[in-house]
Image (cartoon, grey):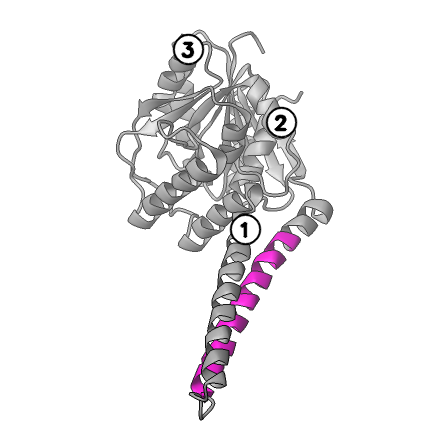
């Protein structure tokens, strides 16, 4: 592809019925622009018989469409990593497949990164987010964690609607983590990030695949992936509880020396044992979570495996 070319990477999951609309709108955006472009559709092993055939159909109709079908489900972030590795453009855009990222807003990202040659990544800043309240709450919590854990600039908001230079995409794909988090990786790799205001539309088709449980999981991944904060918290908490227990023991010993304790307290013993036992089990659980992540990183399956492809190949 030529200098200044654009690759648009879209992770796809059970979105076959509206992929044609997505492709047509993207094609319309670039019809009057000078950049050469490609649309890379990564099917994350959709469990239907519609999505991949539709990708094959689009790849056959449009020379600028390429498709990749995953052998097994790897999640949205894993599918994006696959798309980044397959993309050919000098600039790479990532966007969702649900049309909440309007293709008509793509020129804003492209123009912004051309107008600011010192910037490595430009992320869309939604003027009004059309997510559910708990999704928005989760996004704010995730942003707070990125600020504290990764040192993200408070003036920058992360989003999945972004454009990056090829060197950043190549750096991201060099990470070999089993659970890639694109926002976290981007912040780690560069501070040359800016926002540009974009529209965010209500989801016109289907339902979001992000449940509250999945949002919590992504948040925990962001914490455990980078930080040992949970371990440090329990270390500090254990030190504090040990100090309190020692102080209480000293007080009880003094009371016993002066003969002020006549009957042993059954309730206090039971509550003390329950409290410290629960604390120990929680600490063990946190340590176990880190051990599980280490095992997953060392002996887990590949980040993705392409089963078949459609369209022009490398």
- Total marks placed: 3
Q: Which mark is residue 116?
A: 3
Magenta region, mostly helix, strand or loop? helix
Q: Tell us which disc is closer to us: 3 or 2.
A: 3
Q: Is residue 230 above or below residue 123?
A: below
Determine which quarter of the picture holds residue 103: top left
Which mark is first along the chain, 2 or 1?
A: 2
Residue drawn at (54%, 43%) of the image? 227
Q: Quadrant of the N terminus?
A: top right
* Numbered range of the magenta stretch: 265-291
The foreground one among 156 and 83 is 156
Q: Nearer the viewer, residue 100 or 56?
A: 100
Front position among marks 1 and 2 = 1
Locate residue 266, reporting x and y percent: 46, 88
Q: Quadrant of residue 259?
A: bottom left
Distance (Cα) linking label 3 and label 2: 25 Å
Q: Position of residue 209 (x, y in %)?
A: 43, 48
Q: Which of the two discs, 3 and 1, sits closer to the camera? A: 1
Q: Is residue 110 above or below residue 257?
A: above
- Mark 3 or 1 closer to N-term? 3
Name above or below for residue 253 compared with residue 67. below
Residue beneath disc 1: 232
- Which residue is disc 2 drawn over? 85
**10 Å neighbourhood of mark 3: few (<14), some, or many (≥20)?**
few
Closer to the camera in the image, 291 or 261: 261
The residue depicted at 58 percent of the width and 33 percent of the height is 81
């Amino acid at each position: 592809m030529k200098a200044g070319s654009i690759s648009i990477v879209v992770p796809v999951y059970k979105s076959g019925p509206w992929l044609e609309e997505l492709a047509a709108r993207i094609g319309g955006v670039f019809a009057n622009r000078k950049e050469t472009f490609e649309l890379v559709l990564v099917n994350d092993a959709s469990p239907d018989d519609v999505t991949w055939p539709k990708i094959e159909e689009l790849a056959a109709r449009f020379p600028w469409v390429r498709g990749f079908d995953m052998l097994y489900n790897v999640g949205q972030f894993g599918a994006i990593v696959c798309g980044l590795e397959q993309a050919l453009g000098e600039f790479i855009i990532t966007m969702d497949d649900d049309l909440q990222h309007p293709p008509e807003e793509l020129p804003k990202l492209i123009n912004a990164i051309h107008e600011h040659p010192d910037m490595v990544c430009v992320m869309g800043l939604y003027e009004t987010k059309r997510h559910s309240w708990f999704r928005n709450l989760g996004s704010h919590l995730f942003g707070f964690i990125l600020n504290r854990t990764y040192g993200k600039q408070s003036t920058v908001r992360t989003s999945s609607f972004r454009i990056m230079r090829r060197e950043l995409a190549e750096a991201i794909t060099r990470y070999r983590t089993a659970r890639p988090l694109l926002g976290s990786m981007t912040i780690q790799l560069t501070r040359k990030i800016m926002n540009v205001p974009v529209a965010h539309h209500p989801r016109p088709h289907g339902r979001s695949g992000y449940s509250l449980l999945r949002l919590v999981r992504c948040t925990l991944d962001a914490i455990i992936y980078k930080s040992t904060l949970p371990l440090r918290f329990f270390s500090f908490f254990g030190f504090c509880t040990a100090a309190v227990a020692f102080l209480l023991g000293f007080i009880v010993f003094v009371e016993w020396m002066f003969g002020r304790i006549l009957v042993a307290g059954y309730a206090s013993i039971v509550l003390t044992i329950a409290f410290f036992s629960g604390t120990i089990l929680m600490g063990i659980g946190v340590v176990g979570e880190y051990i599980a992540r280490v095992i997953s990183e060392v002996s887990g399956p590949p980040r993705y495996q392409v089963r078949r492809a459609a369209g022009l190949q490398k």
